[in-house]
Amino acid sequence: MELGARVLKTGVAVTLALYLCALLEWTPAIIAAVAAIFTMQPSIYRSWRHIRDQLQTNLLGASLALMAGMVFNNEPIAIGMVCIVVIMICIKLKMESTIGLTLVTVIAVMDVAGDAAVHWTFALNRLLVILLGIGSAFLVNIAFFPPQHEKRFLKQVNDVFNKFSLLMRASLTDMMKEPVFRKQQEELKRSLHKLEDKYTIFEEERQKLNRGKLSRVRLLVVYKEMLETLRKGLALLEVIRRHESSILHRDCPDNRLESQLERLVKQHEWALLRFAGLAIDSKNSSNTEKEWILPGSWDPEDQQFTGRILIAAAMYDYAYHIARLERLVRHNSVKSEKKAVRRFLSAYSKDRR
């Protein structure tokens, strides 16, 4: 079980909301805690967008609940009908994520329906309590453990690649039991899906909160290609498993697929290490997708021919994206090195003065 930053921040936000309600003597504090739980999001941008949507739908829901409360009091049927109307409005506004907390607002406001003056006072109090919980979650999300999406994304890229390379070697050597391989393959798919979600959050935040920064845009292109290359690698792995007899057919005198696959995985690894600054430049890896062809000894009448063609096509696709990733990594590395040189020269000139 992993105790992540979001789990900790949710607990801190709930605590802060309860303390603030006690300090301001606003009741019931439990509603502020519920609002804080609903509002906690995995990124700062999503928190801001969620708060913006929550303010709109909660104010709308509170207004409808006030009017319905003055007409129908706190009749259960009336509360249910207002909830239905609010849900329909939230869906129409494409703010489905706010439905849960908005319904809490509606129920909290209509629950105190009765005398008009008392109703307005209590309704305003309930709305302020909910807004306090929303604000507490947003404040905690910014101030405590700010999301480090870039660092976590790169760590997950390396983790997914390590799982992929292990399964690729296992598929070539047939050294892993089939049930174990299938389990590891499913785990790899889940890890890749999580990585895609992480990239979506990272891209969303960079584009919305860091507009106009060309260096950030270049990095997003590199990260997107890292993700796409892993997708193509997983697709190749699945094709190999479906047609493994074609690649493990040892009777073919000119079977180079196995060595070519090993080379592709190594070049993929080099690209990731080069981006991290852990590998030296390589002059023999820029034309990955052009350096191999189908062996001429393959016979179309052979039973393994179709499988080999499919494997070769998936290999070419994987190789193309490896080559593209290498070019992007080289370009980004050159830009970073030039910036470092300029910073050094600037600092050196100041010292000389």
Image: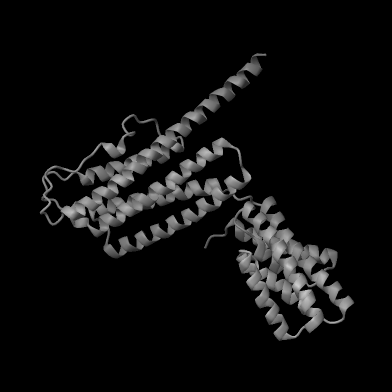
Q: How is the image coloured?
A: one colour
* 151 on left or right of 128: left
Q: Position of residue 319 (x, y in %)?
A: 32, 43
Residue 86 visible within the image: yes
Nearest the eye: 60 or 156: 60
Q: Residue at x 71, y 81 (%)?
A: 79
* 161 on left or right of 89: left
Image quadrant for the C terminus? Answer: top right
Q: Is residue 142 above or below residue 134?
A: above
Q: Position of residue 50 (x, y in %)?
A: 65, 59
Quadrant position of residue 115: bottom right
Q: Is residue 297 above or below residue 112?
A: above
Q: Position of residue 209 (x, y in %)?
A: 63, 45
Residue that extends furthest to the front in the rendered view of this protein: 92
Q: Residue at x 78, y 72 (%)?
A: 28
* 349 on left or right of 236: right
Q: Residue at x 28, y 41 (%)?
A: 263
Q: Is residue 353 above or below residue 22?
A: above
* 296 on left or right of 13: left
Residue 248 visible within the image: no
Looking at the rendered structure, the number of numbered marks drawn on it comes to 0
Q: Is residue 94 above or below residue 345?
A: below
Nearest the eye: 271 or 225: 225
Quadrant position of residue 77: bottom right
Residue that extends furthest to the right in the rendered view of this protein: 117
Q: Position of residue 275 (x, y in %)?
A: 45, 37
